[in-house]
């Protein structure tokens, strides 16, 4: 079955990576796992060995029909719920209404919608407790801000959870072979705890961050002057700093003051 470039399909064929993804998920029998884009079902097989219920959402009609046959037994036994649909339009709340309260997202995701997937699930009313995702290696490094330069992406992930790189996965372990290496990341303890503890308005916080990063080459003080509710004294204290120079704690402090 040929991968579709338009859907960002690259099928993982490394047994070591598949095992490590499942291991990183710390899966228990009572866990509910949401898998995004199961593809040919290689990761699905590993997840079924550990979890009580897998909800797999596949956009590709051809692959969906293939998976229906491959996992007919698991679908009939209700250990796997296979859904044909677009994950960005998928409503997890409808599934959670069936008595399910918590879930984990574990997936080798299409790289062209990495940012959209992170935004959707980190800001859901019903957030997953944990996310284990295969992403581009460069994206993983940006999320962790390994160069000590923050971005909207890194701040966005760290405000809701605790990111960590689990392992690097070379391009040769995928079919077709992509042009870049990949990495498995984990995001643990997902919640709105930071917002609640600091009494921050979520929408206003993101307005400040997005405004700060609006013009990357400009000084942060210049960007933030457009926000009338941030005092001049607070802006002046930023000096010549740019948005990327502020840590998560700095953004929290700025939003509080």
Image: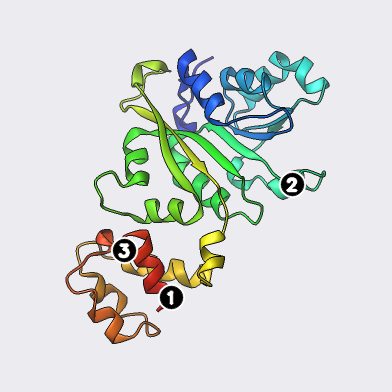
The quarter of the picture where the C terminus appears is: bottom left
Q: Residue at x 78, y 15 (%)?
A: 73
Q: How far apart are the two marked residues, 1 and 3, measured between alpha carbons?
A: 18 Å
SS at circle 2: loop
Give above or below for 232 relative to 165.
Answer: below
Residue 256, image x, y percentages: 43, 75
Q: How far apart are the two marked residues, 2 and 3, measured between alpha carbons?
A: 35 Å
Say how the picture is coloured.
rainbow
Asked if the residue at tag 3 contacts the one at tag 1, i.e. Cβ–Cβ closer than 8 Å, the answer is no
2 or 1: tag closer to the N-terminus: 2
**Can residue 13 be seen in the rendering of this structure?**
no
Q: Residue at x 59, y 30 (%)?
A: 26
2 or 3: tag closer to the N-terminus: 2
1 or 3: tag closer to the N-terminus: 3
Q: Nearer the viewer, mark 1 or mark 3?
A: 1
Asked if the residue at tag 3 contacts the one at tag 2, i.e. Cβ–Cβ closer than 8 Å, the answer is no
Instruction: Rate crowding at label 2 as few (under 14), some (14 to 19) or many (20 or more) other CA atoms within 10 Å.
Output: few
Residue 223, image x, y percentages: 28, 73
Residue 113 versus residue 55: which sits nearer the camera?
Answer: 55
SS at circle 3: loop
Asked if the residue at tag 1 contacts the one at tag 2, i.e. Cβ–Cβ closer than 8 Å, the answer is no
Residue 179 versus residue 19: which sits nearer the camera?
Answer: 19
Q: Residue at x 44, y 52 (%)?
A: 158
Q: Which residue is mark 1?
A: 256
Residue 193 versus residue 59: which sits nearer the camera?
Answer: 193
Q: Which residue is mark 3?
A: 213
SS at circle 1: helix
Q: How far apart are the two marked residues, 2 and 1, measured between alpha carbons?
A: 32 Å
């Amino acid at each position: 079955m040929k991968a579709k470039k338009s859907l960002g399909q690259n099928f993982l064929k490394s047994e070591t990576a598949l095992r490590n993804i499942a291991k990183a998920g710390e899966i228990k029998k009572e866990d509910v796992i949401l898998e995004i884009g199961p593809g040919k079902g290689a990761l699905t097989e590993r997840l079924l060995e550990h979890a009580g219920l897998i909800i797999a959402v596949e956009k590709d009609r051809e692959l969906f029909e293939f998976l229906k046959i491959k996992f007919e037994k698991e679908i009939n036994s209700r250990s796997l719920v296979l859904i044909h649909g677009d994950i960005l339009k998928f409503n997890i709340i409808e599934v959670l209404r069936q008595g399910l309260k918590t879930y984990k997202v574990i997936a080798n995701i299409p790289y062209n919608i990495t940012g959209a997937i992170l935004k959707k699930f980190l800001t859901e009313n019903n957030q997953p407790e944990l996310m284990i995702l295969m992403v581009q290696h460069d994206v993983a490094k940006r999320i962790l801000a390994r160069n000590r330069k923050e971005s909207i992406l890194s701040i966005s992930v760290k405000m809701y959870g605790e990111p960590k790189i689990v392992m690097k996965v070379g391009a040769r372990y995928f079919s077709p072979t992509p042009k870049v290496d990949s990495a498995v990341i984990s995001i643990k303890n997902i919640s709105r705890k930071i917002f609640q503890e600091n009494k921050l308005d979520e929408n206003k916080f993101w307005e400040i961050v997005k405004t700060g990063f609006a013009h990357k080459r400009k000084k942060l003080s210049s960007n933030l002057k457009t926000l009338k509710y941030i005092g001049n004294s607070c802006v002046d204290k930023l000096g010549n700093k740019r948005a990327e120079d502020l840590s998560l704690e700095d953004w929290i402090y700025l939003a509080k003051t």
